[in-house]
Image (cartoon, helix red, strand yellow):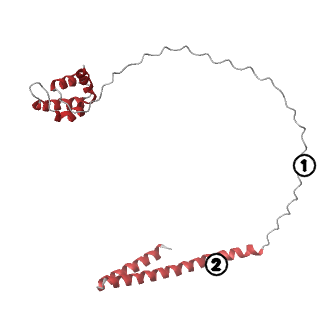
Amino acid sequence: MTIARFLLEAGFLVLVAAAVGLAGLGWVWIAVVMFCAWLLVAVVERSEGKAGAARRASPAEHKQEPAAETPSPEPPPEPEAEPEPEPVAEAEAKPVLTVAPPPQPPPATEPEVPAEPEVVVPLVRRDSTPREWNVWDLERIASEQEGESLARDEERALLLMSLRQFANASGDLPVDFDPLIREAFGTALDELRMQGLR
């Protein structure tokens, strides 16, 4: 398809759309007229395509006619395959006896390294029943572990500062704060529990 023909068909469709739009027809009539215009363009395009294909095929037929007139040479006859010779029976092979090499000596064993003594870790009973915690003990644990994690140190310092107002005169906190303290201090409370068991 040439560019000129494409531009001509596109221009036709645009002009039909503009004319129908200016005529003030309803959307149903605009759709019907545009479909008919598109159908007309499709029919013209198809007929041009068939005519172009016929024009392209006719010169090719003229070129093929002389080739059809010349006879093709016959293929040479295939030579007859020679029969394969029958295999000669091979003499039976006699078994050969060989001497097996002597067994390898076992690898030298490494001297035994004395086992390191096992480290005994005291088992702390995980008591999940709520209990009262002492603010002063919690502050001592926080100061001993200070410097390991800056975020955790800051969290514990702010928590302890706000918990002081709820502690009684001896520093004991109500049982209601147990889950909060366990979450903030975690395994650091094991030392405090061990002291409580003694």
Foreground label between 1 and 2: 1
Q: Nearer the viewer, residue 54 or 192?
A: 192
SS state under label 2:
helix
Judged left or right of residue 188, residue 139 is left
Would you say residue 19 is visible in this rendering?
Answer: no
Judged left or right of residue 110, residue 37 is left
Task: Name the residue located 33 percent from the left edge and 81 percent from the top edge.
Answer: 18
- Rendering coords of residue 179 (x, y %): 22, 35
SS state under label 1:
loop
Tag 1 near tag 2, CB within 8 Å:
no
Q: Nearer the viewer, residue 12 or 36?
A: 36
User: Which label's residue is closer to the chain start, 1 or 2?
Assistant: 2
Task: Name the kind of residue labelled 1 in the image.
Answer: Glu
Q: Nearer the viewer, residue 146 or 115?
A: 115
Task: Name the kind of residue labelled 2 in the image.
Answer: Ser
- Rendering coords of residue 62 (x, y %): 68, 77
Q: In the picture shown, does residue 62 fall above or below 185? A: below
Quarter where residue 147 is shown: top left
Checking the image for residue 86, the label placed there is 1
Residue carrying label 2: 58
Query: Distance from label 1 to label 2 (Cα)?
Result: 60 Å
Task: Name the residue located 50 percent from the left edge and 79 percent from the top edge.
Answer: 45
- Classify 10 Å Cα crowding around label 2: few (below 14), some (14-19), many (20 and above): few
Q: In the picture shown, does residue 19 fall above or below 157? A: below
Checking the image for residue 104, the label placed there is none
- Rendering coords of residue 78 (x, y %): 85, 61
Task: Name the residue located 75 percent from the left edge and 21 percent from the top edge.
Answer: 101
